[in-house]
Amino acid sequence: MFPGQGAYLPGALAPLAEDEPLVRETLRVLDRAAGRVGRSAPSRLLLDEDAPSLAELVVRSPADLHVALFAAEMTLFRLLTERHGLRPTVLIGHSFGELVALTAAGVYGLDDGMALVAARDDAFAECPPGEGGMVALAVSASRAAGLLTGLGEWEVTLAADNGPRQCVVSGPAAALERVRAAAETLGIGATRLRVPYAFHHRMLAGVADDFARRAAGLRTGQARHVLHSAILGRRLDGPDGVADLVAAHLVRPTRFTEAVRRLHADGVDLFVECGPRGVLSDLVEATVPGVRVVAPLRRRVGGRSVADALAGAGPGALPGAVVSLPPPERDPAPLPRASRVDGDGDGGPGAGVGAGGDGVRDREAVIETLRSLYATALGYPPEVLTEDADLEADLGVDSIKQTELFAQAAARYGRTLPAEGSRLTSYTTLDALAGLLATLPAQDAGAHGAGTREVSA
């Protein structure tokens, strides 16, 4: 499985590159490919944990973001197939990830795959669409369709069917805001995504035409792997199928839920994510409960952790897997489980906070406390703040707000914040933040107020 735009993490491949020479070797090839189409080297974003965040790149340099996504996923694909012997039965991508899947399947070589990504951004520059956007709704695609029909908002359409309780709609900015407000009034979770355009919408028809024209000039070859398109709703069948996918990529919805169910019905029982963060893995688990899912790079990890993740898939993990590349973020050191929870024991805010802050050792209690704290501050329903929801990519919490909230959490547990310059947004989930809290030193008796120390977002 090849994820889309949300699967970026600064320095995603840094630990992996330390002990897997194939990673640096592949990135060198991809850096040269990027240079040939006038793009910056993606390795600078994938090997430096202090590189710009997802939110920064979306606003300031989307072309750099797309090159980095392509490079991360292709590097992981090569590592999984050549180093670990993964033999994919079928490849599937989500939105932008379908272009990466075309390259992984062998339709495009690395140079032409990189040129395809550049052509997409060049088409946006040449034919800029009108102001639009996307909103994630915490309901099924069918319920979202009913909402749009009831509101009479014909300009807003389904962009992505992600799972039984999650879909994305897109459209013009004003109409989209009316839908978002109406959904919230009805108690439906509605989050405006940080994207500049109405992707998977007819507003991008001009861009799509220009993109297809540019892509037609690139060399294509015979696919080495089967590719199932969630946009076309079928497996690709030669050059005509590739052209159809490129033409439809920006204007037709991604029906990921239907694709996953079809693959599972065809006998696929192991899904491997080829990209940072594990977003698609979570969607698959929600769609087909009990299926085997592997996201080797949910955190920034080294080669041993990737090998362990694949081994943990159980017997038969390597032959006949579906491939998608996962999301990185360094794993906190393993924490001992506390035998009891210090504090008032009710699991609410403040639970687990005892003398010396030892309550941070009970990870589950800390996550519950963080969930309550963040939900209150952000105005989100607590159930939206799952332990692995990405605060920035999934929930739109900017880096300044993340730093402010973590400072409150550290103060609540009597912990001293990391040294100035630490990037708190490298810890993108409640689970990761709970792990970070456990590593922080306790404040001295007179040191309360250390929680206001300046740290880098």
Image: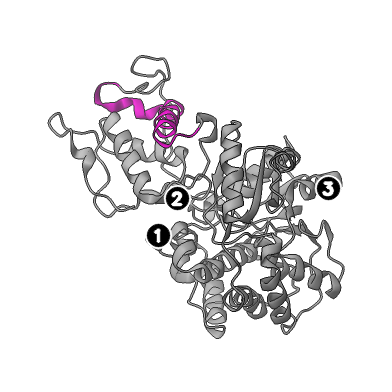
Residue 262, label in figure: 3
Q: Is mark 2 on a helix, strand or loop?
A: loop
Q: Nearer the viewer, mark 3 or mark 2?
A: 3
Kindly tell me whether residue 296 is visible in this rendering. no
Is 364 inside the magenta-drawn segment?
Answer: yes
| Residue bounds of the magenta highlight | 354-380
Reading the chain from its start, which is encountered first: label 1 or label 2? 1
Residue 49, label in figure: 1
Q: Are marks 3 and 1 in contact (CB under 8 Å)?
A: no
The picture places residue 429, in percent across and down from the top left corner, at 47, 42
Residue annotated with mark 2:
330
Q: What residue type is labelled 1?
A: Glu
Find the residue positioned furthest to the left.
446
Residue at horizontal 71 percent and vertical 82 percent from the top: 218
Q: How far apart are marks 3 and 2 (CA)?
A: 33 Å
Q: What residue type is labelled 2?
A: Arg
The answer to which quarter of the image holds residue 188 is: top right
Reading the chain from its start, which is encountered first: label 3 or label 2? 3
Pick the residue in front: 400 or 29.
400
